[in-house]
Image (spheres, rainbow, N blue to C red):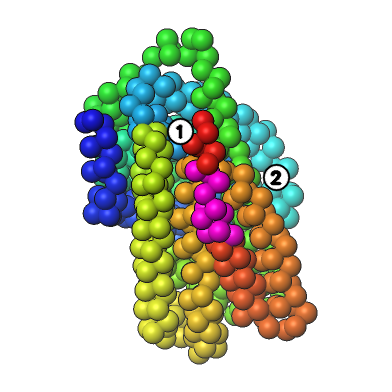
Amino acid sequence: MEQKLNIQKMNTNRNLFRMSIPIFIELLLQLLVGNMDQIMISHYSQDSSAAIVNANQIMNLVIIVLNMISMGTSVVLSQYLGANDKENATKTCMVSLTLISGISIVITIIVLGLNKRLFELMNIEPKILSEATLFLIIVGAFILVQGLYLNFAAILRTFTFMKHVMIVSVIMNVLNIIGNAILINGLFGFPQMGISGSATSTVISKIIGLALIIYIYRKKVALPLKLQYMKPFPTHILRKLCKIAFPSGVESLSYNMSQLFILGIINTFGTMVTATKGYCSILANFSYVYAIAMAQASQIVLGYLLGAYELDAIEKRVWNSVKVALSVCLGLTLVLLINSDLVFGAFTSNPEVHALGRRILMIEFFLEIGRALNIVMTRALIAVGDAKTPMVVGITGHWAIALLFAYLFGKVLGLGLEGVWIAMTMDECTRGFIYFIKFRQRKWKMALSER
């Protein structure tokens, strides 16, 4: 009875809002200072900045792989906590940490052994190859630290310790900025290290972040991490994790790969158009970042509800989350559109960019309808055990709608960036509509009822 009351208390709009705010701030921090290495090194050397851009392309793919395991951890763990099954909850933590450690080590070996080959495939300029390789070797050697941090952060969020994760994130980012300033430029008697200083600062801040987050876990979470829970090995939990993680990771990789090809199309329109695309993408990120925070918080609550077998409450929670995400995304996009000249003025004084950007934001308003639906519904479907639909529909939409029509509208019909944005809007809205219908069909509910 007490467990049921706790879950009912968690499943309120007010509590979900409280859960989403720390996640929102953490995501916002990632947007604001996520490119701090590149920004700060650009004042030292443009070549070094370009080297970091290329190295981060590889690291971003690595983080996608690690994030998919962390998402699986959160979903499975929340279900066991909702069912008040502490033994399997502990096993989930142990299996996920073992899995992410193993994958991190394998990726580290690949990155360290094949870094030059990877850069050759990316057609990197020879003059920045050595610096890009140096940065990737230093950061890549500590992928295990990144993986463990992401997984412990997911565990703490699942236990609703969002504020603690946010505080650690703030500390990490501040340390990284301070470290960059000191090591890149050689302040306070330190040698001027340039790009290696930036990489070293990144690694040190992540190691400190991992130490802090493990400390918080040991103080706040009442699940001891002991090897005895791995004997015999809980293969049923590993299967559940992989069933969620693999499709989610494939969908994320597909999206990012298709976006690279779309960027290739946009690059043919000229530098001004490419720059406008970059500015509009930054603004779009701010429009939907709260929707991501809401979806993450909602997914945790859905896992608890599923574990407690509160199936009717799951539907209500999803529709409430969709309404909030839509309202915030559209509201922020509208504010940006109304103040477009002021907003684009922060980037450039070029009137062509302002005019094109304003037209893109008009299309963006409709794109955000589909995107808000996608963000919330994808995590909702994964939370109720349907990770296959977002993968299949996502891959189809990324390539058969977004990329194909971006080429047709942008290049063949000559609509340029507006045509590309219309194609991406078609993709987002089509996928959002399919997910909406899929959830409304309640097949997930029937499948759970039969178990």
Tell me residue 223's x, y (percent): 32, 22
Res. 260 image quadrant: bottom right
- Residue bearing mark 2: 118
SS type, badge 2: helix
Q: Amino acid at mark 1?
A: Val
User: Vertical placement of 142 versus 165: above or below?
Assistant: above
Alpha-carbon span between mark 2 and mark 1: 34 Å
Tell me residue 27's x, y (percent): 38, 54
Quadrant where the N terminus sits is top left
User: Majority secondary structure of the magenta segment?
Assistant: helix
Q: Secondary structure at mark 1?
A: helix
Residue 274 seen from this side: no
* Three-letter residue code for mark 2: Leu
Q: Name the image quarter holding residue 160.
A: top left
Residue 240 point in image, percent of width and height: 54, 30
**Residue found at x 33% / y 18%:** 224
Report how many numbered discs are placed on residues in the image: 2
> Residue placed at 41% from the left, 42% from the top?
311
> Of discs 2 and 1, which sits in the foreground?
1
Residue placed at 78% from the left, 79% from the top? 412
Q: Is residue 439 above or below residue 71?
A: below
Q: Which residues are magenta?
A: 434-445
Task: Identify residue for label 1.
Answer: 76
Query: Of the numbered discs in the image, which one, if any, rests on residue 328?
Result: none
In terms of image quadrants, where is residue 245?
top right
Left or right position of 219 against 240: left
Crowding around mark 2 (Cα neighbors within 10 Å: few <14, some 14 to 19, many 20+) is some
Describe residue 313's horizontal placement relative to residue 133 as left or right: left
Judge by depth and name the residue closer to the eye, 101 or 287.
287
Residue depicted at 38% across the width and 19% down the height:
87
> What residue occupies the far right of the structure in this picture?
412
